[in-house]
Image (cartoon, grey):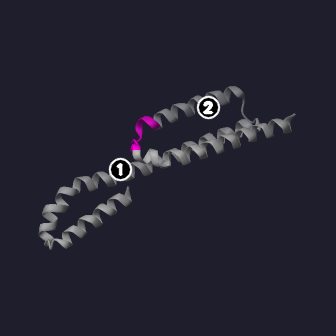
Amino acid sequence: MWITLIGVTVFVLSIAIASGMTVEGFILTVVAPLTPAILWGVREIQKQSEASRNLDHLLKNIEVLWEKALNGSISDQDVRLQSVVIQDRVFDYRSKNPLVFNWVYNLFRDRQQMSMRRKADGLVVEVKDKAKIKS
């Protein structure tokens, strides 16, 4: 998003300089009308950053629960209960956080799916190795 804002700013400044606009004319005809869009962009960047921090915190909670489950330091019933709590938090996270533009989703989808598959495969191997050690 920052790249888009910077790109638009450079583009608008280039047009203003090329057309020989005065500072007063530039402010009245360009800056004033674009201010709401710029402010929206800044707020959106802040929302996305906060959403990312919240997601990182949720991921850490999931990883802690995973480790406890693998180590056997938590009962199956507690794993189920905490899993439900995590699912509730994921739902809450998705319902309250800003949407991602479709073009952004499509841009990163394939890489994220490959990463998810590798992580899932690694987790399966981790569980199988742990089961072999126990038996």
Q: Position of residue 129 (x, y in %)?
A: 80, 40
Q: Position of residue 94 (x, y in %)?
A: 45, 37
Q: 17 or 95, which lies in front?
A: 17
Report the magenta residues as a range: 94-102
Residue 39 vs 135, above or below: the answer is below
For this view, does 45 lie left or right of residue 79?
left
Amino acid at the residue labelled 1: Glu
Instruction: Report if residue 80 lies within the magenta region.
Output: no
Q: Are the residues at dot 1 and dot 2 in contact (C-beta closer than 8 Å)?
A: no
Q: Position of residue 121 (x, y in %)?
A: 69, 41
Give the residue number, with chain letter if any, for mark 1.
Answer: 44
Q: Position of residue 111 (x, y in %)?
A: 55, 48
The residue located at (20%, 73%) in the rendering is 17
For this view, does 20 lie left or right of residue 2?
left
Q: Is residue 102 visible?
A: yes
Q: 78 or 2, which lies in front?
A: 2
Mark 2 Cα shell of 10 Å, populated few (<14), some (14-19), many (≥20): some
Give the residue number, with chain letter if any, for mark 2.
Answer: 82
